[in-house]
Structures are given as C-alpha cells and as structure tokens.
Amino acid sequence: MAKEKILITTPIYYSNADPHLGHTYTTLIADILTRYFRLLDKKVFFLTGLDEHGAKVQQAAQKAGKNPQDFCDEKAEIFQKTWRKFGFEYNNFIRTTQKPHIKAVSNFFSYLKERNFVYKDFYKGYYCVGCEQFKNESDLVNGLCPDHQTKAIWMEEESYFFKLSEFQEDILKIIENSEMQILPESRRNEILDFCKNGLKDISVSRKNVKWGIPLPFDKEYTAYVWVDAFLNYLTGLGWDGNMKNIPEFWRNAIQFMGKDVFRVHATIWLGLLKSLNFEPPKKFFVHGYFTVDGQKMSKTIGNVINPLELIEKFGTDGSRFVLAHTLYYGQDTDLSWKRLEAEYNDVLVKNLGNLVSRTLKLAEGNCFAAKNFEFSDFANKAFKNYSENLENFKFSEAIDEILRIVNFANRYIDQEKPWADSCSEKGQIVHNLLVFIYYIAFMLNPIMPEKSREIFDQLGVKEKNLYRIKEKFVFKPLKKENLFNKIN
C-alpha cells in the first residue's frame, strides 16, 4: 500500500530582518507535526522559506546600503543557519528570487490575463508596508497599523486588479462546507463574517516597487508581493506554472500561519487557487502571538527575542520544548526570560530529568524483561490523548499528556519507595518506571528528538517504536547521565 502523502507548509518569511520567535514557533510546530507523521510512516513534504520581494525588503536593503539580492542572500543564510540550530527537517527552503519560481509566477500572471481575471484600474487606499497589506480604515487605530505601530500610507496609483469578488461565493462555500478546515473554530467564524461583508477586487501589481517580478504583459509593473509569495506553496513542490500540472502533495495540504496573515490566506490565496481550478488546502491552523509586555512581537517594533539566544541558554531540544509548550491552542502568550527559565528548570530538570535519573539509578546493573506493565490503561490513554492533540494542532496540550505520565511516575516512585529494604516488589516497580520512561521517550521524539534518543540509549532498548511494541520491553539500562542541567 502506498504511503499517505501530506504537505506541511509555513508562510514564507520576509527577508527584511533576522528570524524572530514568531517565525521560529511556526516552523517548530510544522517540524513537530512532520516528525510525528513520519513516525506513523506517512510521506511528508515540509516546505518553508523566504519571501524576498516587495517594498519592505527593498527599503531594508537600501537602509543597509546593499543591493536587494545580496541583502536577501545574507538573510537566507541566517535563517537557514538558525533553522539548522533548531533541528528543523524541511524538504525545501524556497526563495522567491529563485529562477524557477520567478518563471512560474510570470506564467501564472499570463494565465490570469488570458482568462480576463485581471484588469487595469486606479487604486486609492491605505497600505501598511510592514504588513505589505492593504488596510481598511476600520483596520487602523488612530491611523496606525495595530501590529506595527506605524502610520498606514495613503496610496494612489494605477494598478492591475485581480477579480477576487468573482470568487466570493466559492470561498464562502469552501469555508462553510468545511472543504478546508480552519482551526481554531473562532478563526473560521471570523473569516466567514469578513467574507459575508463582501470581497473587493484586489490590486496585484506595483508601479513604484522595482524589486519584484515584472508582469509579463506590462513590464512597468511588478507583481504584488503576496501573490508572488502565495505561489511558493506550489512552486516549492516543483510546479512550473502549468495549469494542468497540480503537484501531487498539494492534494493533502496542511498550512500553518500566525493570525496576522490569516485573512489574506483565506481570501486572496483561496481566490487564486479557484482561478486555477485547484482544490483548496485541507487545513489551516492559525496560532496566536508571542507578546512582550502585551505588545505583539515584531521586527518593525523591535521587541523581538533572538531565537539563537534560546539555543545558547537551553540548547536545541530545551529550546524546542519551552517554545512548543508555552503557546496554548489559538491563544496569545506573554513571554519573558523568567518564564522560559522556570519552564526549563521546573519541568525538564526537576520533573523529567529527575525521574529518569533516579529510575536508572535503581535499575543500574540489572536487566528487566517481559514483565507485565501494571499501568497500561493509564499510559495508553495518555498516549491516545497525545496523538489526538497533535493531529488537531494542540501542541502544548500534547506535551501536557507527556507531563501527565512524568508526574504520575514521580508520585508512584515516591509512594512505593523501591529503594527501601522493606520493599518486596522492587523489580516490578522499577520495571513499571522503565516502561513509563519508554512511553515518555517515544512521545518526546517529535518535540525533543535528541533527548528522546538519549533516553532510549540510557534505557538500553533496541525497539524504539510504540506502534510495533507489544509490551515486551527488554531494558538493559546503561550508566546514567544527567539529561538536563539547571539554568541559573
């Protein structure tokens, strides 16, 4: 039987500055789900990359005194170096300045023109360069973009427009009939209300932005950066702009994004797909923001935490854990170093690390094989909840199920006191604890792959897959080493 094929994407990130925690979080949860599905023997294509065109990138390059391409090359190297540090296992890191992508975008615009999906008109309205998005007056707070705290620019220029309004009913049908699932549900309701108020045709070209892909039918204009960027989800799979050549992985696409880019994905992107007669993605997951002192973390504002600082402090897997566990389903969360350090010290060092350490000390020098595990129902239920949470993009909640086993096992060892001379069931108790740790190591694998392997190695087990094991655990524990060291 052929393996199920799944596409997992992040938005492609602007190359106007270095990566921040928001980018890192989106890429992390995509990586976690990718690793999880691969454990289930599914074939996953994980796509991420950089959006390298547009006014924002052009301005950042000018400010740095560099030509845009050299500037983007430097940023691409920094992003990829950072993603390597976090252990992200993507299949493709696409850049919109790559020639195959540029060719496909050009072909797509020719297609739109041939089908009369674009027309020339005069644009008047507000525009936020930070978002690279058009803004209604109702979107602004005292004339400012609420995300970037910058004044929206009033723009008046001749432009080519995409007939998005023609696809309003199609987009509503896709969302109402759940042809594309939007999670959390609150985001689905939000976009339905927005679409029911009417979708307007959207400007898809720029006359005064030279850093972009020229329109094939009018070289005075470049492609609107969002249209250019959206097509990466197809070109990153090798799509060349041939309208009959839909990439196979696209048929089962899961797309991750922050709420700041959700609206344009759920309207413009779906409209572009309908113009191609391509099916919509299967799922959108829209996560919340990291905030600092209640304000969205933003490179434009400057209140960002460098992801590499996390690596320096917590290491790769420690950083993956604290970041994945901090942001709950669909919610915003306020970050501080104090909070992250407490998460690391209290959860990883004190609870998980201590459990593994003292269990292996009890087991040292002995072999534990094929005994009955007395807590199968509890552990299997936690594992089932963990799987359901991951498959519904509840990453922090999935980690909570791992910690439920950790906390239960710690209480169990304290209650049974297997180190005491009076304990007559030491062998069974230690075996139970080793099986608990086996479950923990397996469930940690998508989140903390290196620490998961470390725990398996310390358990001395050969079989490292819960899906194939049938409680015939054979443990030959090795000399213990500390998994985590306390952060001061």
Image: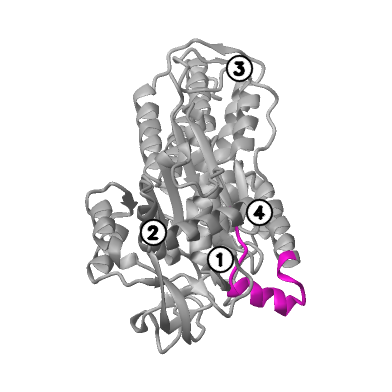
Q: Are marks 1 and 3 in contact (CB under 8 Å)?
A: no
3D distance between C-alphas at marks 3 and 4 = 46 Å
How many C-alpha atoms fall within 10 Å of the one at disc 1: few (<14), some, or many (≥20)?
A: few
Most foreground residue, 246 or 64: 246
Kindly state the secondary structure of the residue where label 2 is placed.
loop
Ranked by sequence position, the earlier of labels 3 and 4 is 4
3D distance between C-alphas at marks 1 and 4 = 41 Å
Q: Is residue 238 magenta?
A: no
Instruction: Residue 311: give x, y in percent of width and height.
Output: 68, 53
How many C-alpha atoms fall within 10 Å of the one at disc 3: few (<14), some, or many (≥20)?
A: few
Q: Which mark is residue 115?
A: 2
| Residue occupied by mark 1 | 336
Most foreground residue, 91 or 302: 91
Q: Which mark is residue 462?
A: 3
Instruction: Residue 127: give x, y in percent of width and height.
Output: 47, 80
Instruction: Residue 284: give x, y in percent of width and height.
Output: 38, 51
Q: Amino acid at mark 2?
A: Arg
Quadrant occupied by the N terminus: top left
Q: Amino acid at mark 1?
A: Ser
